[in-house]
Image: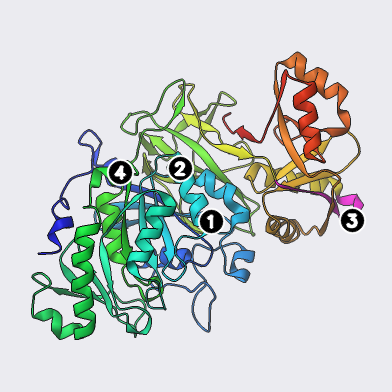
Amino acid sequence: MPGCYIRAMLDTPTNRPDLPPEIARRRTFAIISHPDAGKTTLTEKFLLFGGAIQMAGQVRAKGEARRTRSDFMQMEKDRGISVSASAMSFDYKTFRFNLVDTPGHSDFSEDTYRTLTAVDAAVMVIDGAKGVESQTRKLFEVCRLRDLPILTFCNKMDRESRDTFDIIDEIQENLAIDVTPASWPIGVGSDFIGCYDILRDRLELMDRKDRNRVSETVEINGLDDPKLAEHVPAALLDKLREELEMAKELLPTLDPQAVLEGHMTPIWFGSAINSFGVKELMEGISKYGPEPQVQSAEPRQISPEETKVSGFVFKVQANMDPKHRDRVAFVRLASGHFERGMKLTHVRSKKPMAISNPVLFLAADRELAEEAWAGDIIGIPNHGQLRIGDTLTEGEALRVTGIPSFAPELLQSVRAGDPMKAKHLEKALMQFAEEGAAKVFKPSFGSGFIVGVVGALQFEVLGSRIELEYGLPVRFETSQFTSARWVKGERQAVDKFVNANKQHIATDHDGDVVYLTRLQWDIDRVERDYPDVKLTATKEMMV
């Protein structure tokens, strides 16, 4: 039976027996993709099948269709793209899914990078017509650096798509990872009728009439079962049998351990907008996705089964509710069983914090979290005490590592339309800097601020949010500087360097020294004339 070559290892358990059951059932993962591959639509269908929502929205809403749950900022709603990572928690069967919908737009890749420090696996969404695109490749490399397991969903099979073997070959060649099919498409575009579920040896048929309906399943006994001919046209059935025979010879068998180690990715085919293939992918996440993993920290690693609670801030979002000027820190719990009202130590300040109103998320919606476990993502409302990279523990001085900050690639000066509002502008900029939405630099000379971002769209988002959330129109102007580098070295060497280069010196929102450059020549000069000083393009957000 053709399905058996992969199905043989289907029942291999992945859960560690030493984990408490509540932790072992957690699956915390991110969805990554190139823009417009269908990532946000897939997220909506996860929520639909998990019972978290009653009707899925559409990214570009028509008529009565709701706006998508995971795109909650005004600009996201207007443009139909995700520019901020959204966290969502919901149950699926016996599992607890913690899903993070990351920005697909390349201008917001730093937010995505930080998000990937807070998850245990990633679902990679690719467009069946376009295959592996540039942003997908970049995000995949980040996952590889963190040894994250990756499950792949090839979307939009109801449209004209590339040959199945071509898609698999491209993933294997471009991303240097073994690919094993969990399902196989039957037809493409207008001829697409569904998939053969290789793992369960059954036929999944797509319903084009009801986009929110689960696909029809036909149990069969191998590819020679006469029932197949009742549902699949003869030409498509012949092609299916031929392709699966080739897949058996050419592609590797599913190895759950190789998936967990990040060496192999199983691939499902489907159409998220038609709800097709989504439940099969969710089953795959349940079975092959890892439970909460060990977290890197100093002076020691943190294991999820530890009884004491610990967690770290990987994102800060201000003004999620425009009616309340609030700030919420997104905290990934690394260990223990958290209960509302607990007092945790804020390691950076060494001060205790009573966590009285923690929340669980469904995008912009939230509910009070009475309890949470290692692997969960909770929100802690605060007035600016919590920053990205902060660690919370039950007293031990642990510092979670590996949360980076990147030097911006574009710099502009920013000014308030009303000069009398300079203090208001400073407050807004500092808030967005703490949120990680932009880098804000205060030059040693002159007034005003320089804002640094990765991509030009971030200036537009920042200007829009400052006006919307603070009622403060601003204008961005060309800066004489083109890039920024953090200055590292012994205190005496750094002080000497700063005093000799004050025209180029600024500080970031943390008070760290930054060197602003106009040309590559500036960097080369520093490396030549100041060997005791190092200019870096990244900063570890470990505090």
Which amino acid lies under the numbered mark 1 shown in the image of this protein?
Answer: Gln
Left/right of residue 305 with respect to residue 328 in the rendered view: left
Quarter of the N terminus within the rendering:
bottom left
Front disc: 1 or 3 = 1
Left/right of residue 242 with respect to residue 51 in the rendered view: left
Q: Which mark is residue 418?
A: 3
Work out whether residue 541 or residue 325 is closer to the camera in this orientation and state it: 541
Give the quadrant of residue 456.
bottom right
Front disc: 4 or 3 = 4
Among the two numbered marks 2 and 1 on one chain, the one whose residue lies closer to the N terminus: 2
> Which percent across, then down, holds residue 158?
38, 78
Mark 1 and mark 4: Cα distance apart in space:
23 Å
Q: Which mark is residue 260?
A: 4
**Does any portion of residue 276 appear in the rendered image?**
yes
Among the two numbered marks 1 and 4 on one chain, the one whose residue lies closer to the N terminus: 1
Mark 4 and mark 3: Cα distance apart in space:
55 Å
Work out whether residue 386 or residue 464 is closer to the camera in this orientation and state it: 464
Q: Which mark is residue 118?
A: 2
Label 1, secondary structure: give it. helix
Mark 3 and mark 2: Cα distance apart in space:
40 Å
The answer to whether the residue labelled 1 contacts the one labelled 4, judged by CB atoms less than 8 Å apart, is: no
> Which percent across, then down, holds residue 411?
77, 47
Residue numbers of the magenta segment: 409-421
Q: Is residue 138 magenta?
A: no
> Residue furthest toward the top?
492
Residue identified by numbered label 1: 135
